[in-house]
Image (cartoon, grey):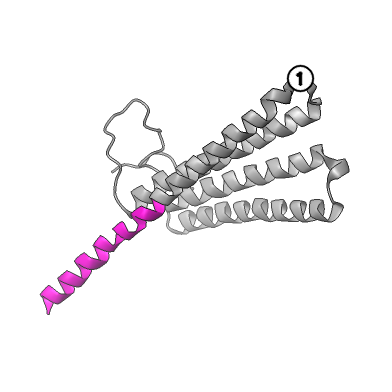
């Protein structure tokens, strides 16, 4: 009976590898964002001198938005893979992000909501930059959604703070962890 239990536990533990294709799919999504980033550059550059300042700012905001989405994907890929599948062994590579291997699920959640708030803010700013062509009802909903993201981030942070306090650890640190 103990050997059956051990076999089931090994199978359950090995099932974490079923997540690996998800993270590979997210790498493909990162490549898709790169294609859209390059496409936006090629769209803007030929007409750069003829564009209005506000159009250039909107194009730059689009590039920033794509960059933030890429950063968000990298955080999910690295942290998710390391938290749920296997540690990424790059040794002491000089380009290894400082946070890699140190962000737990709670820290990842806060980083994700912060990225989502930033992306939402950029979409809202783009709408304000083009206020004359923006549907007022759509703008209203953008503000509501952005406010919801901000409130969610605040409540996530407060929940982490309260949980850390009730566990007697003080405010939770999302930086380096000792292994």
Residue 169 seen: no
Residue at 42% in and 46% down: 77
- Quadrant assignment for the N terminus: bottom left
Residue named by callout 1: 49
Q: Nearer the viewer, residue 81 or 176?
A: 81
- Tell me where residue 68 appears, x and y as whole percent: 57, 39
Residue at 67% in and 24% down: 45
- Quadrant assignment for the C terminus: top left
Q: With respect to residue 168, does 15 lie above or below? A: below
- Element class at badge 1: helix
Q: Quadrant of residue 123?
A: top right
Residue at 84% in and 56% down: 137
Residue at 51% in and 54% down: 160
Q: Main secondary structure of the magenta part?
A: helix
Residue 158 seen: yes
- Tell me where residue 37 appears, x and y as whole percent: 58, 35
> In the image, which residues are magenta?
1-23
Q: Nearer the viewer, residue 58 or 173?
A: 58
């Amino acid at each position: 009976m103990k050997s059956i239990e051990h076999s089931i536990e090994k199978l359950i533990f090995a099932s974490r590898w079923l997540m690996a294709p998800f993270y590979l799919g997210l790498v493909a999504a990162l490549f898709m964002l790169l294609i859209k980033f390059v496409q936006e550059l090629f769209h803007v550059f030929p007409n750069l001198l003829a564009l209005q300042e506000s159009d250039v700012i909107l194009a730059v905001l689009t590039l920033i938005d794509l960059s933030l989405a890429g950063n968000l994907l990298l955080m999910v890929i690295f942290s998710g893979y390391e938290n749920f599948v296997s540690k990424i062994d790059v040794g002491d590579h000089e380009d290894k992000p400082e946070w890699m291997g140190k962000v737990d699920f709670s820290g990842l959640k806060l980083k994700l909501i912060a990225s989502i708030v930033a992306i939402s803010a950029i979409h809202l700013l783009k709408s304000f930059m083009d206020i004359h062509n923006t549907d007022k009802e759509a703008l209203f909903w953008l503000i509501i959604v952005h406010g919801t993201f901000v409130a969610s981030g605040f409540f996530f942070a407060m929940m982490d703070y309260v949980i850390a306090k009730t566990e007697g650890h003080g405010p939770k640190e999302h930086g380096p962890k000792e292994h």
